[in-house]
Amino acid sequence: MTRPAHHRPRHLVSYTLGHSAIAMPPIDPRPRLLITAGPTREPLDSVRYVSNRSSGRMGLALAAAGRVLGWPTTLLLGPITSAIPPDQDAIRFETTSDLSSLLHAHWPQHDLLIMAAAVCDHRPAIPQQGKIQREGPLTIELLATEDIVASIDSITRPEQVRIGFALEPRECMEDAARDKLRRKNLDAIIANPLETMDADTIDAMLIDASGSTDVPSMTKEAFAHWILEQAATRYSPGIVDTTPVQGLDADA
């Protein structure tokens, strides 16, 4: 079976056309990494919105880890309040619809997706122009947002790998994550309890079709390196080199 391009060894490919050999550029064996991070915001009126407390720190740590490994990395980043590293490029989004458009545009050019963004499950049905005034009780109708991870299933190639996150109450975390793994047709999902939000550390479980792996509590930066190693060895076996590129580090 022909391996996908990022699983093949680096070499010079040549094709023969008539009596002439056409040399093609070397194939880059490094996986192309796509990361989403941060919250989405769904407008209620011109000044207010529905959102969540995601800091984007996990996604930023994943992008930094990808850079250390020398993997071509694209970061789709929501409206976080903290500053991002000056050498970290990011494509920004605001709403779930914005992120969906970016994901559909960028996913075909990548090999590995880690969906660390905290996407709002609901949005106001009709955002109001201007500012809603305080004039007694207010009822807001909410509609479910698009399941954007499931929506890219139709444009996902067999060799592409998708890893999601599930932030759930600890008592039902594993069952809820397994349900998301199945519904969203993911290769793996990282289940983590509600306490992870705003925390410096992560206490997680990696779940895939073969079972689950409990991950001891560690910093989000250490976990980012661990999950990229797992992605390379478990789900993309042709990607075996997770050695940091000389001269690069997460704080560079």
Image (tube, helix red, strand yellow):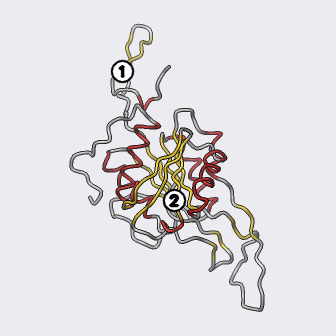
Q: Earlier in the sequence, mark 1 or mark 2?
A: 1
Which residue is found at the position 47% from the left and 37% from the top?
235
Kindly state the secondary structure of the residue where label 1 is placed.
strand
Q: Which residue is mark 1?
A: 23
Up-down relation of residue 36 to residue 50 (above or below): above
User: Tag 1: residue type?
Assistant: Ala
For marks 1 and 2, give the CA distance: 48 Å
Count residues near mark 1 (Cα–Cα under 10 Å), then give few for <14, some for 14-19, many for 20+. few
* Image location of residue 130, percent across then percent down: 69, 81
User: Tag 2: residue type?
Assistant: Asn
Q: Is residue 175 left or right of residue 87?
A: right
Task: Choose top left, top right, bottom left or bottom right for residue 133.
Answer: bottom right
Which residue is found at the position 30% from the left and 57% from the top?
250
Which residue is found at the position 30% from the left and 50% from the top?
68
* Image location of residue 187, percent across then percent down: 55, 41
In the image, 100 versus 129, the foreground residue is: 100
Camera-near label (1 vs 2) is: 2
* Image location of residue 161, percent across then percent down: 51, 40
Say if mark 1 contacts mark 2, CB within 8 Å.
no
Kindly state the secondary structure of the residue where label 2 is placed.
strand
Q: Which residue, as the protein is rendered here, is positioned at the far bottom?
A: 135
Up-down relation of residue 232 to residue 64 (above or below): above
Q: Which residue is mark 2?
A: 192
Count residues near mark 2 (Cα–Cα under 10 Å), then give few for <14, some for 14-19, many for 20+. many
Q: Is residue 30 left or right of residue 79?
A: left
Quadrant containing the C terminus is bottom left
Q: Which residue, as the protein is rendered here, is positioned at the far top?
A: 19
Which residue is found at the position 43% from the left and 53% from the top?
215
What is the total number of numbered labels drawn onto the structure image?
2
